[in-house]
Amino acid sequence: MASPAPPAPPAPVAPPPGPWQQATVLEVGTETASAKTFRLRLPDPRPYLPGQYFIVRLTAPDGYRAQRSYSVASAPGGDVIELTVERLPGGEVSEFLHDVVMPGDQLEVRGPVGYFGWDGKAPALGVAGGSGVVPLMAMLRTARRAGTPGLMRLVVSARTPEDLFYSGELPGPDATVIYTRRVPPGDRRPPGRLAPGDLAAAAGDGRLAYVCGSPAFCDAATALLLGLGVPTDRIKTERFGPSG
């Protein structure tokens, strides 16, 4: 009889969010046709866990304010964070970031926030759908920087190669990309939704599982993990909804 999976370790203690501060935009990079990454320098760096997010607040001349939460894509450390933002039609914050903000501008930010955090020590499996890869990319970057092979394994579901975030960096022995609509030349897996076989190898060794994506994706991925025998207390989910 197989040994039961060990209980999930205590959740890492999330650092408290700091005050609002004016971050300087260092660089704006393109990930996909609808997503950009903003590199920001913080005057008062706050420690954060891979998986957490920061809040961006915009203030109009008449005093009207709008704010949205965006996951951090960069590994912790230093005074620079990266936020990847998907442009949503009619999104008052995302459209402003995409259409107006440029290097040298300042943005009001506050964080870190959220409890979807990884301590960077316990072996982890990330399962991401679409833009849900952003907080899991922070985890993958943390693991790669630690130089510990296999510490973090990531499975990403994307519609097409053009929809894949971080396409120039993500591929590697610790990351698998599943395409649901169209695959790149040479890809041996036909297009299709995430299946048990895509997760079986990494889900069977007692790892903590971090699932991030749309509510429908999270429900489907969680069902697959449960079907593979991953206990409920070892699955953490972060559901992404429209954040304009």
Image (cartoon, helix red, strand yellow):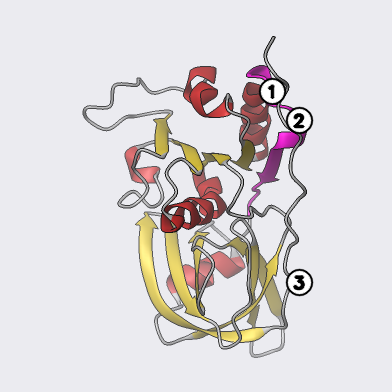
Front-most of 80 and 144? 144
Q: Please give the range of residues in magenta.
A: 226-242
The CA span between labels 3 and 2 is: 27 Å
Q: Position of residue 114 (x, y in %)?
A: 72, 60
Residue 10, visible in the rendered structure: yes
Residue 213 in view of the camera: no
Residue labelled with disc 3:
16
Residue type, label 1: Leu
Residue drawn at 68 percent across, 26 percent down: 230
Distance of label 3 from label 1 (alpha carbons): 32 Å
Mark 2 residue element: helix
Q: Quadrant of residue 222?
A: top right
| Left or right: 186, with 104 as reference point | left
At horizontal 63% and vertical 37% (from top left) the residue drawn is 209
The one nearer the camera, 211 or 109, is 211
Q: Earlier in the sequence, mark 3 or mark 1?
A: 3
Q: CA distance from mark 2 to mark 1?
A: 7 Å
Q: Residue 47: which quarter of the image? A: bottom right
Q: Is residue 214 above or below residue 88?
A: above
Mark found first going from the N terminus, 2 or 1 = 1
Does the stretch in magenta take in 238?
A: yes
Categorize mark 2 by other alpha carbons within 10 Å: few (<14), some (14-19), many (20+). Answer: few
| Residue at the disc numbered 1 | 226
Residue tagged 2: 232
**Three-letter residue code for mark 3:** Pro
Quadrant where the image shows the C terminus: bottom right
